[in-house]
Image (spheres, grey):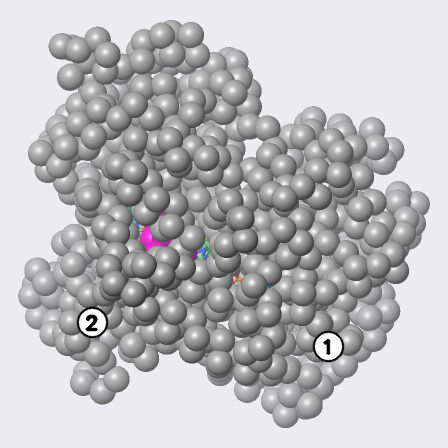
Amino acid sequence: MPNSNSSKPPYSSPAGGWGALKSSAKHLIQSENAMKSVKALLKANQPGGFDCPGCAWGDGTHAGKIDFCENGVKAIAWEATSKRVDEDFFKQYTVSQLQQWDDHALEKSGRLTEPMLYDARDDHYHPVSWQQAFELIAKNLNQLPSPDQALFYTSGRASNEVAYLYQLFARAFGTNNFPDCSNMCHEASGVGMTRSIGIGKGTVTMEDFDHADAIFVFGQNPGTNHPRMLATLRKARKRGARIVAINTLKEQGLQKFADPQNPKEMILFSSTDISQYYFTPKLGGDMAILRGIAKGLFEKAEHDSNILDHTFIDEHCDGFEDYQQAVINSSWDEITQQSGLSRREIAQMVDIYSNSKNVIFTWAMGITQHRHSVATVRELVNVLLLRGNIGKVGAGACPVRGHSNVQGNRTVGINEQPSMQFLAALKARYQFEPPQTSGFNTVDSIHAMLAGKAKVFIGLGGNFAAATPDTARSYQALEQCDLTVHISTKLNRSHVITGKSALILPCLGRTEIDQQASGQQQITVEDSMSMVHGSRGQNAPASEHLRSEVAIIAGIATATLGDNLIDWSKISANYALIRDEISAVIPGFKNYNQRIETERGFYLDNSAAQREWKTLTGKASFSAAILPSHLSSTVTESLSTQPVLTLQTLRSHDQYNTSIYGLDDRYRGIHGQRKVVFINDEDMANQRLQDGDLVSIVTVSNDNITRSVSGFRVVRYQIPAGCIAAYYPETNPLVPLESVADDCGTPTYKSISVILKPQV
Ligand SMILES: Nc1nc2c(c(=O)[nH]1)N[C@H]1C(S)=C(S)[C@@H](COP(=O)(O)OP(=O)(O)OC[C@H]3O[C@@H](n4cnc5c(=O)[nH]c(N)nc54)[C@H](O)[C@@H]3O)O[C@H]1N2
Ligand SMILES: Nc1nc2c(c(=O)[nH]1)N[C@H]1C(S)=C(S)[C@@H](COP(=O)(O)OP(=O)(O)OC[C@H]3O[C@@H](n4cnc5c(=O)[nH]c(N)nc54)[C@H](O)[C@@H]3O)O[C@H]1N2
Ligand SMILES: [Mo]
């Protein structure tokens, strides 16, 4: 069983702790620029420092405390690497050769140093001047028969400043085509919450976590993806709050945690038990759980008038009767069968929920990447509303965002479906007619490229080729473009899946000093708790030829549109001027420049948190959806003679989305490999599989497209029967482009119907 460690016992130490410290040190050293990284770290999430480019969890109160985590260290060290992808590198390798490299090898090659243009004749990238690059983009954009043939992708690391300029430029050019990472991420949270409570963001602040009596964590793995959240949960647990984890997998970080920044816990090898309550539903079973909680509450309410918050419901909500009826119509059999939990387990949740005065629900991708994600988000809100848990201290809804500024990007206008108010504000400020029709989201964009309806792709960060579903078709889509442009820090898959012409435009990273004509600049970001704060890079840029993202967008805009609408170079020389524009157009940003100078920045008002409901009816709306009739993406049992399993694709501990830092997943006991598939005992026995066997994973679908990946090792794991798990992005080829969430178009990355085929 070469290279497989699956016989090793699973990780038994607490999450965080010495393991995290050891791993942080390893990544710092491997960055080959340890001093630079360490210096940078001390400035992470500090006033006057930079916002960690890792996750979107809020900052704690500082008082001189360091505020970063093991995975923040990796993100910073990864950016501070001393390796370079320069002219010589591209001379050495053809693009076809680079296509054979895996994602880890591509990004590990280092930081991009100067603009590069692809030449199909010799299959190499060659240096190009910034001005030539801008003119090439302008030419391609201006010769399109319609502005809607251009796509403007954003990944959520972009600052508010660049995101605002980017949307202004693309709208002035004439399109709302803003596919973004959010379309693949928390879209369902935005859509569901907007319908239910009139705002698509979380309603809690960091302080609320100090006052919650119970915190339910749904479909989220904070130990890996939001490690600083563990410190918040630990603090809550220590003061007696109840932490309830609902996760298909028993995640180490949700069970035990030793704070690497707490010397006492470290020295005593002690840890805090994070979740006293841990429930492991089937994939996609959360809506049924919530329905069960509601059913339990209604049953209890028959004997106890304090169970439901009638005053709140009467004053603030509508749709209550229909919802109650929907709950009555959902049978316990249906609920237990679909959730995979017993009635006893659900009753336990009902007790915790109804005995807690203030409750917070947090969630992430385990909720948002299913077919019925919007309905599930609305069901989370329904259950919160039943006890008035929105708009009071210590309670609320907390979708924990992914990328560090994905929420801010939406706030400043990256949205393929902009509101009429926003477009009107743009029009009033700049006297142009912004496009009114909705643009393409991420999946629509792939369809449009495949159909020849989109010809120019521009990516502000991210790795579109690797992050999107149905890899073969995504590649084909990009390859059919006339021009693909990527504004990036590091080499990735999207650079080697080129359009007929392709540009790589290398930019400064978040940790780097951004010097413009008016002096050193800061940028701003918004975290999951709607706090907007400044971020100032500390490291010297990786190359003298790099430009800031703002400067790059301004350069493209000037070349494409000229300076009629706005003087792009003037405002890109001083980002305070961009913030003045944002203040003038977007509510909540008054005195933007002054307010980011305070220690923790400022809070963007949240209407739902004030119990002001910006919905069609002016009330918080209960939704009365029926439970889905089936859970996996394409239930086509009849199409297959083998048992159909439901696959979720998830992150290991050593990756940041498509950036693969290393090949370990310490908390899940995986070392030196990524092509593994987690499966339960019973399913292994059914399929006559042994730990360590090699299998192919094949999608079951009825569209006559074969989708499979091979060379995956079977790892026995505690996971509900019928459900399996494997890492993203290796499994993206399995996700059909058509398999998206109802009402929001997010690919169903957490529920794909597959079969396993043993490989001999
Ligand atoms: N270090 C690091 N940090 C990151 C990222 C990263 O890749 N690396 N990515 C960032 C981004 S963009 C995002 S969106 C977030 C992602 O943060 P997460 O949502 O935590 O990421 P995933 O690894 O996709 O994990 C999904 C979790 O949900 C569980 N789950 C899956 N399906 C279900 C289900 O149907 N029901 C329930 N109850 N549980 C389920 C899985 O077992 C897993 O624990 O993290 C952000 N932070
Ligand atoms: N199967 C499956 N697929 C998924 C998911 C899943 O759970 N399963 N999750 C989805 C989710 S939640 C998300 S958010 C998307 C993520 O999709 P993306 O945001 O598109 O992907 P990332 O991997 O975060 O992008 C990494 C690249 O960003 C560039 N980069 C890094 N820092 C900067 C910077 O400061 N500026 C610029 N301009 N570029 C920078 C680097 O070149 C790096 O290679 O993937 C989605 N895809
Ligand atoms: Mo995400």
Q: Residue at left 70%, top 52%?
A: 523
Q: Position of residue 267 (x, y in %)?
A: 29, 65
Q: Which residue is mark 2?
A: 714
Q: In this image, 584 relative to 85: left or right?
A: right
Q: In the picture shown, does residue 41 fall above or below 332?
A: below
Is tag 2's residue or tag 1's residue first in the polypeptide sequence?
1
Q: In this image, 539 relative to 657: left or right?
A: right
Region of the chain picked out in magenta, as a range: 220-226
Q: Position of residue 448 (x, y in %)?
A: 59, 53
Q: Residue at left 42%, top 53%?
A: 228
Decide: few, some or many residues near mark 1? Use Cα within 10 Å; few <14, some 14-19, many ≥20. some
Q: Which residue is mark 1?
A: 543
Q: Nearer the viewer, residue 127 or 76?
A: 76
How many marks do you count on the picture?
Answer: 2
Q: Which label was assigned to residue 721?
A: none
Amino acid type, callout 2: Val
Q: Position of residue 277 (x, y in %)?
A: 19, 42
Quadrant hosting residue 276: top left
Amino acid type, callout 1: Ser
Q: Nearer the viewer, residue 621 or 308?
A: 308
